[in-house]
Amino acid sequence: MFLFKGEMNGTMAMLQLKKVHLERDEFELEEIAYALSEAKEEGKIKVFIVHQQQEPLTGMVMKMDANTKLIHIQNEAGDVYKVHFLDILEVLSAE
C-alpha cells in the first residue's frame, strides 16, 4: 500500500506503509462475521479482542457497515467505537 506518490527535488518519491490489518484465512473471517451477526441479533454485551489494543472492548454491536467494513460497538457508558472488521480477532461472551 502506498501513501504518497509525488516528486521531490525532481525525483520520484514513494512512501510505503506497513500492512495495517492481520492476514487471516477465509474460515477465520467467516467465523468472526457469524459471531458479529449473532451478537447484533441477540443485542447482548460481548467482549471483543481487537488487534493492537491492549484492553479488550466490551459492548454491544449497534451497526455493521458493509461499505466501510466498520463495526459500531457501544459500551455500557454509551460511547460508540468504530472498529474495522479485519481488526477484530475474537468475539467472546461477556458472562
Image: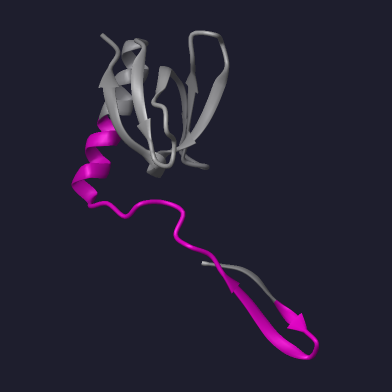
77 over 21 or under it: above or below:
above
Q: Is residue 32 found left or right of 61 in the rendered image?
A: left
Furthest-bottom residue in view? 10
Q: Is residue 16 magenta?
A: yes
User: Looking at the image, how many numbered discs can be counted on the residues?
Assistant: 0
Furthest-left residue in view? 27
Q: Residue visible at 23% across and 52% down? A: 25
Q: Residue visible at 30% across and 35% down? A: 33
Check the picture and name the quadrant holding the C terminus. top left
Furthest-right residue in view? 9
Name the foreground residue: 89 vs 31. 89
Q: Position of residue 83 (x, y in %)?
A: 48, 34
Q: Position of residue 34 (x, y in %)?
A: 26, 30
Q: Position of residue 35 (x, y in %)?
A: 27, 27
46 over 53 or under it: above or below:
above
Q: Residue visible at 53% across and 65% down? A: 17
Name the foreground residue: 55 vs 91. 55
Q: Residue visible at 26% across and 22% down? A: 92
The magenta segment: 6-34
Name the foreground residue: 94 vs 35. 94
Q: Is residue 83 found left or right of 28 in the rendered image?
A: right
